[in-house]
Structure formats: structure tokens, C-alpha cells
Image (cartoon, rainbow, N blue to C red):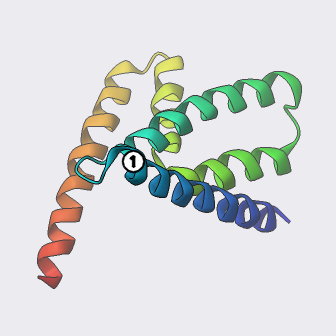
């Protein structure tokens, strides 16, 4: 059943991201990745709100968590999951691991995009 909730949330999140993309280009033009910035910041804010709410009010509701965080926000932006992982390390007092995770994630992801592009180009 969890897969169904993730799939439904993912479809809605991806559709919302597409809507933000269209709106951002219409409002700001296409010269800067405004849509990506907007979904990343909104998605991270929503991840914080939703995670806190679920932990306090619905700690045992796995289906709602899967739908909202993994599905909806995962489809909207994967940056929100990255940020939640960073925050979790930080909350546990593992700041060197959190900073290392952030640095390695960003650097390796950029390198992976470049390498993937070079494989084809």
C-alpha cells in the first residue's frame, strides 16, 4: 500500500513542480533557474512543517508520511529530502558528518551531471 501512496503523492508533486516551472518562466523569464530555486526553498520549508506536524500529531501514520514527504515533496523537489537528512545529522549532533554529507552530495552530484553529459556529448 505504501507504494501506492508514494506514487499518488509523486504524481501530484511532479505536476505541482511543472506548474511552478511554467509560472516562473512567465513571471521572471528563463535566464535564471528561478523555478528550481522556488521549489527547493518551498519544498524544504514544507518538509520542515510536515515532518514536525507528523512527529507531534500523527507519529504512527506511515501512509500519510509516505504520501506527503516521500511522494508529494519527493516529486516536487528532491532537495527537500537532502535537507531533511542534513538536519537529522545536525539534530543528532553530528555536525562534521552533516557538513561532509552536504559538501560531498553537492560536489559529486555536479560532477555526475558533467560526466553524464560528457558520456553522451
Figure label count: 1
Q: Quadrant of the C terminus?
A: bottom left
Image coords of residue 115 (percent x, y): 15, 69
Image coords of residue 67 (percent x, y): 76, 52
- Residue that appears at 69% across and 31% down: 51
- Residue that appears at 56% across and 29% down: 45
Q: Quadrant of the N terminus?
A: bottom right
- 45 vs 29, nearest the viewer: 29
- 20 vs 98, nearest the viewer: 20
- Residue that appears at 31% across and 50% down: 29
- The relative height of residue 6 versus residue 79 in the rendered view (above or below) is below
- The relative height of residue 28 versus residue 90 in the rendered view (above or below) is below
Image coords of residue 74 (percent x, y): 58, 53
- 61 vs 96, nearest the viewer: 61
Say whether residue 99 is left or right of residue 62: left
- Residue that appears at 82% across and 21% down: 56
Q: Is residue 74 shown to the viewer in this render?
A: yes
Say whether residue 40 is left or right of residue 56: left
- 95 vs 80, nearest the viewer: 80
Image coords of residue 27 (percent x, y): 41, 45
Q: Residue furthest front?
A: 26
**Residue 49 image-quadrant placement:** top right
- The relative height of residue 68 versus residue 18 in the rendered view (above or below) is above
Say whether residue 6 is left or right of residue 115: right
Which residue matches tag 1?
A: 36
Amino acid at each position: 500500500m505504501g507504494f501506492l501512496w508514494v506514487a499518488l503523492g509523486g504524481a501530484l508533486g511532479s505536476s505541482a513542480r511543472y506548474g511552478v516551472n511554467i509560472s516562473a518562466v512567465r513571471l521572471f523569464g528563463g535566464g535564471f533557474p528561478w523555478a528550481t530555486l522556488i521549489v527547493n526553498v518551498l519544498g524544504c520549508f514544507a518538509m520542515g512543517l510536515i515532518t514536525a506536524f507528523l512527529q507531534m500529531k500523527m507519529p504512527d501514520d506511515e501512509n500519510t508520511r509516505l504520501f506527503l514527504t516521500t511522494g508529494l515533496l519527493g516529486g516536487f523537489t528532491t532537495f527537500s529530502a537532502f535537507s531533511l537528512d542534513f538536519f537529522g545529522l545536525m539534530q543528532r549532533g553530528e555536525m562534521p558528518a552533516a557538513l561532509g554529507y552536504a559538501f560531498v552530495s553537492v560536489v559529486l552530484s555536479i560532477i555526475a551531471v558533467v560526466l553524464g553529459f560528457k558520456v553522451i556529448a
